[in-house]
Image (tube, grey):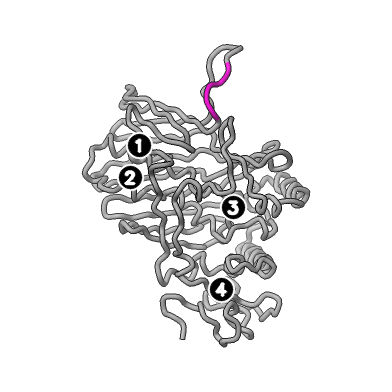
Amino acid sequence: MESIDDPCTTPRDGRHQEIWSGEIGYLPYSLLLGCPYDREAPPPTYTSLRVLNRERSGDKQSQLHGYEFLSEGGLKCVDEQVLAKQKGIIIDVIGQVTACLLQGKGVVGLSLPIRLFEPRSTLERMLDRWSFMPVYFDGINRVDRLEKFKRVMAMAIAGLYISPSQEKPFNPLLGETLQAEWPDGTKAFCEHTSHHPPITNFYLENRHFKILGHLELTGKFKKNSLIGGFQGTVNIEFNDGQKVSYTYPRFRAGGMIMGSRTANWEGQMVFTDRENGLAATIVFGPEKKKGFFSKAVGKLDDFRGVLTENDEKICDINGSWLRNLVIGDTEYWNIDNHRPVFHRFPVNPLPSDWRYREDLVWLLKGNSEIAQKWKIKVENRQRDDRKLRGLKY
């Protein structure tokens, strides 16, 4: 008898612990309702909450496992297992990229081999960016507007180093959802609301604040790098009426065709509180000096900026997304001293929750062969659905 809290985590017919049924080809919450039974790709039992909510280590070594720090800044992937998985697909990827460019599309929706994926949805990867929210928003209702603004910056910048995995999360399906919660009572609700362009709406709620908005997942090849990330604005509304918004920088994965596989953030983050006249622009990368013969100062992972109030400078901002954040004379975040607080998944989410995707579940169980077959099934069903809606992309 399966637990109400964990639907379909035990076999329907009691034969194989990882297979829900040996006769029915789909699960109750499946996107593929009505598909015939396939002996080569049976429906999996869903993953229990004990596995989904297993402890995740927040220390630097665990989060940056498989990477080493580069002397010029940024990270280099040295995980031989990950690098081995990615060998031999460059020609296939280049062919798909060419086709996407000819059709005027980005590269987010490329159909890639399952061996390149991690068993998580992009929806969950997005939540990782707010892993320092419980740390910096604790007691947020008891501080003034300027301190709130600074803590928003600390929360957003500190989360950049969380899970910079070289493995790709699953692109969300249209209508795919995610529900999560933190120990401080914050609840998160996400839904993938557009396939082209790929856009996800999010809403996080706590008794002292709300975090809401939508982000577009972007990606494009530029020479030897894949550049992308979440494009859009994160809006935070505090109960006292203060509103702060910010944007994310771009993520660059280098060495996609040749050379070392590297990872770094670039571009800028812009923080704004229009009503109170507070603003800050954080620029990533070495500081460029004026003059023809001048060299840039600093490392690739460094950043700097200025905090202003009504266009008047309050203080400087500097640090590194791999080291620390200093606002004025105060160090708000240090990668060695501050630990993230990760979300957990509740019982009984919506049937559209990411955890019910068969391709993802099979990969989580360690069976990439069956996961690949389900991935093809899911992608074909998505194409059929788009045709029914009269969409050509």
Circle 2 crowding by C-alpha within 10 Å: few under 14, some 14–19, many from 20: many
- Confirm whether the magenta stretch covers residue 297: yes
Q: Earlier in the sequence, mark 1 or mark 3?
A: 3
Looking at the figure, which quarter contains the C terminus? bottom right
Tell me whether the residue at label 4 lies in contact with that at label 2, contact meaning CB atoms closer than 8 angstroms: no
Q: CA distance from mark 3 to mark 4?
A: 22 Å
The magenta stretch is: 295-299
Tell me whether the residue at label 2 lies in contact with that at label 1, contact meaning CB atoms closer than 8 angstroms: yes
Q: Which residue is mark 2?
A: 136
Q: Amino acid at mark 2?
A: Tyr
Quarter assignment of residue 384: bottom right
Overall secondary structure of the magenta section = loop
Q: Amino acid at mark 3?
A: His
Which disc is residue 278 wearing? none
Q: Which residue occupies the foreground of this view, 41 or 275?
A: 41
Helix, strand or loop at mark 4: loop
Q: Which residue occupies the foreground of this view, 201 or 369?
A: 369
Quarter assignment of residue 33: bottom right
Q: CA distance from mark 1 to mark 4?
A: 45 Å
**In the image, residue 68 above or below residue 79:** above
Pair 2/3: label in front: 2
Q: Which residue is mark 4?
A: 30
Q: Which residue is mark 3?
A: 196
Give x and y (percent) for residue 373: 69, 69
